[in-house]
Amino acid sequence: MTRRHTASDLIELVLDPGSFTSWDSPIDIARWPEAYRRELERARERSGRDESVITGRATVRGRPVAVVASEFRFLAGSIGEDAGRRITSAVRRATAERIPVLVTTASGGTRMQEGTPAFVHMVDISQAIMDHKAEGLPYLVHLGHPTTGGVFASWGSLGHVTVADPGALVGFLGPKVYEVLNGVPFPEGVQVAENLAHHGIIDAVVAAEHLPDLVERVLSVLLDGPQQPALDRREPAVGAALEPWAAIETTRAETRIGVRDVLRLGGADTIRLQGTDEGERDSAMIVALTRLDGEPCVVIGQDRKAQRAAPMGPGALREARRGMRLANELRLPLVSFIDTPGAELSKQAEEGAIAGEIARCIASMSTMTVPTVSVLLGEGCGGGALALFPADVVVAAQSSWLSPLPPEGASAIVHGDADHAAEMARAQRVSAPDLYAAGKVQVLVEERPADAEDGIDLARAIAAEAAHQVRILLEKTGRPQR
């Protein structure tokens, strides 16, 4: 059976011992009708709380946070006018004090006894949260069991990072209400934390007792300054190490490094974010908060291994745009990694707006408000590659390439067969050195013969160069206030 946490449980499990200081003022219930007032009094006795939420300031692993914690024992955690005002006030105080907000929910939604005035308070809470995020301050959400209705449809779904308790019931409409309204049970297994993670609605399933680890890692990336670089850069290359077709074959080899290797070998405190948070998830795209050779940043990258199983679809590009949006909101540099044999070509992709998503990615990358570095890591085929290409600085591995079609496709158009692919690669000047000569790539990372067999050093060198370029950009623009 899924555990239902009380507010006291969460204080004990998540916050540093003795660190919680309440921000809550006493609530006067005298204005309510007698019958409802008696209901509130019973809820107070049952829960030991004066409302369905508590708020305050605390620390998690020594880091200050504002806390909003639901108390389900108080009228099923429902949000009335007083609870709504309490949450709004806490978020606005956190914004004024410039500290992150951590919310843990357990609620059936808005309070039916108070009707529409309570319902409308979800707008006030959401506005306060958006003002908080507009200041570049983190908003972290842990969805407890259960979280439904107006809570999930407002402040429960606005997190920069959102996780849920294992097995937690999380959904828009409570299953009991659905059955009464429709006369049939709601389908099993839909409104469950694990299913939401699978569909890219939340980022992960995390038990409350593991929240301190997650909060510490997230806030380390979002709020701490840079660390000293520890990886060795390679001397920038100025030309080709291989002729174009040989370079293309190198990037297609099974042993070729990918973005996962760069994160594993060159990143620290990495937190993978899953899906668009809008109900889509495509494993072809990686979105992560990380510290790349000491530099905090948001990474978006095309995963070459995942694309062997399924091509990159429009959902992957929507995930990439989520990463772009997060970078702007959190005022973190964005580093994109290009490595794709091409976007999905199918009925589903066309109906999912693949072309439009490529256009929107290009537009978003071209108008970012934070420093951007794109890395041409391996294959760079078609519009799916161009989608992540625009940046303040473009870094390219020496064997990487970028073309409107795979060379075999270009050969088929011009010659009617694929036999002239190598010739087309040379003629179309697809190689990274060609792009460098044309001024479209600013830095070439040297590749060595040993990299074809063991790419560990190359992955580290790529991470080092990307982070180095981020540092140069930040020196020009100034680091954002934390």
Image: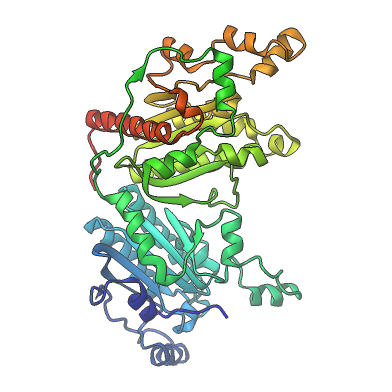
Q: Residue at x 46, y 28 (%)?
A: 451
Q: What is the quadrant of the N terminus in the image?
A: bottom right
Residue displayed at 31% across by 36% down: 231
Residue 96: % across, % down: 23, 57
Residue 68's image quarter? bottom left
Question: Is 269 in front, or is 117?
Answer: 269
Q: Quadrant of residue 71?
A: bottom left
Q: How many marks?
A: 0
Q: Residue at x 36, y 63 (%)?
A: 213
Q: From this viewpoint, is residue 207 visible?
A: yes
Q: Nearer the viewer, residue 440 or 341?
A: 341
**Can you say whether 194 is above or below 347 in the image?**
below
Seen in the picture, residue 96 relative to 70 is either above or below; the reply is above
Q: Nearer the viewer, residue 145 or 136?
A: 145
Residue 324 visible at all: no
| Residue 470 percent location from the top left of the image | 31, 32
Pinpoint residue 312: horizontal percent, then vertical percent. 62, 37
Q: How has the structure been colored for display?
A: rainbow
Residue 176: image location, x then y, percent: 65, 77
Residue at figure coordinates x 56%, y 51% from the top left: 278
